[in-house]
Amino acid sequence: MLIRPLTPSDAPLLAALHAVSFPPAEAWGEAAFARLLALPGAAGLLAAEGDEPLGFVLARQAADEAEFLTLAVVPAWRRQGVGRRLVEDCLAALARARVGRVFLEVAADNAAARGLYGAAGFQPVGCRRDYYGPGRDALVLARPLTPSCAR
């Protein structure tokens, strides 16, 4: 599996991968990805097997904190280590950038994603009621990366 950094020209590919990985009402379009990739501190990784894209992670760093904005893995490649590898590699890159803590939101009813993030060391720190629509809450998860600076 090849992992490479995302570039602004990946916006159409990311939209296509998101569309096959999420329900239609939750999929983000090309314009949204173009805007996200243009944000200061935005970066991500794409996983591929040969010419076949398998998934991606997109994060944004602000000062010494970061947030996973989205993670998508093509359904046929789920539970084969793609998501785990993307999360691990992204966390490693953020640690090298001296990020102290990473946040994300995950649907409370998404057991597979919660398992992936839990295995990566993320812990619940909050809840956003009805974040994904009526009755669909989001859990806010966080994971420390580097120790805070001591003076």
Image (cartoon, rainbow, N blue to C red):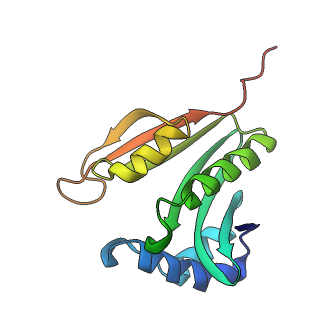
Q: Nearer the viewer, residue 31 or 138?
A: 138
Name above or below for residue 123 compared with residue 70.
above
State the quadrant of the N terminus: bottom right
Name above or below for residue 77 compared with residue 105.
below
> Residue drawn 36% across and 71% down?
26
Image coordinates for residue 89, horizontal then vertical, percent:
70, 52
Name above or below for residue 101 compared with residue 148.
below
Q: Residue furthest left?
A: 135
Q: Nearer the viewer, residue 131 or 75?
A: 75
- The image shows a total of numbered marks equal to 0
> Residue drawn 53% across and 58% down?
69
> Residue drawn 30% across and 47% down?
108
Image coordinates for residue 116, horizontal then vertical, percent:
48, 47
Q: Is residue 75 left or right of residue 94?
A: left
State the quadrant of the C terminus: top right
Q: Quadrant of residue 131?
A: bottom left
Image coordinates for residue 140, horizontal then vertical, percent:
42, 41
Q: Residue furthest top?
A: 151
Image coordinates for residue 60, horizontal then vertical, percent:
64, 55
Q: Residue furthest front?
A: 80
